[in-house]
Image (tube, coloured by chain):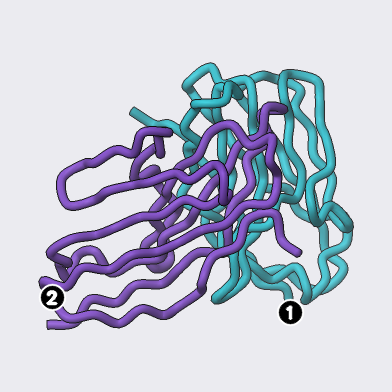
Amino acid sequence: RKEVEQDPGPFNVPEGATVAFNCTYSNSASQSFFWYRQDCRKEPKLLMSVYSSGNEDGRFTAQLNRASQYISLLIRDSKLSDSATYLCVVNTNAGKSTFGDGTTLTVKP
Amino acid sequence: NAGVTQTPKFRVLKTGQSMTLLCAQDMNHEYMYWYRQDPGMGLRLIHYSVGEGTTAKGEVPDGYNVSRLKKQNFLLGLESAAPSQTSVYFCASSRGDLGNTIYFGEGSWLTVV
């Protein structure tokens, strides 16, 4: 079993739709959590950190459920420019970062 | 505002040739990483370093060597390239603490024929 698992998708949604991605992690010692975005043939870039109380950044909302060991990313009012692969990242207390394989989102007109 | 810089960006190698990928960061980060990403796949950690003079194996280290002689540089070497090493290679760096952001270079596209 992988340490960090994501539904690979692809998720194909129309513009304006709301879409949610989940990510599960197996290491209960995991301490910090992030979502990264990777555009086609580009490097991954930080989208947002995920805090225990949940956090929002514009149309993006991240949630953490430590008991069930999963994090989620909700995108509201999807834009064409949101089309990308979204990577879940989990850090352990040893400072090790583990990336999920990513979920691909395509937003269509 | 360079961040993480990788060279070369593109390279074609013949099977058995050797080469070195160079990575430089100007953010004074302690941690540096080399990942590979095959088409349609996730990132896989090759080697990493937690400070100058240190290196450690990641998930897929076989066929690669690394060196971190200076804090700002992390070199990835292929001693005898194989077609299975055709991939995109990303270098990255971070402060190393729990809440840190990992910054990636733009990638190096390597084809082994």
Chain identifier, colour purple: A
Badge 2 is on which residue?
Answer: A15
The C terminus of chain B - image quarter: bottom right
The residue that appears at 71% across and 38% down in the rendered structure is B75
* Residue extending farthest front: A67
Along the line of sight, the residue nearer the viewer: A51 or A105: A51
Look at 29% across and 58% down and name the residue there.
A74
- What shade has chain B been given? cyan
Subunit that carries the residue with mark 2: A
Residue A9 spot, x, y in % from top left: 45, 78
Mark 2 and mark 1 on one chain: no
Q: Relative to the observer, which residue lies in front, B11 or B97?
A: B97
Residue A62, image x, y percentages: 34, 47
What chain is tagged by disc 1?
A: B
Crowd around label 2: few <14 · some 14–19 · many ≥20 (10 Å): some
Secondary structure of the residue carrying tag 1 is loop
Residue under circle 1? B113
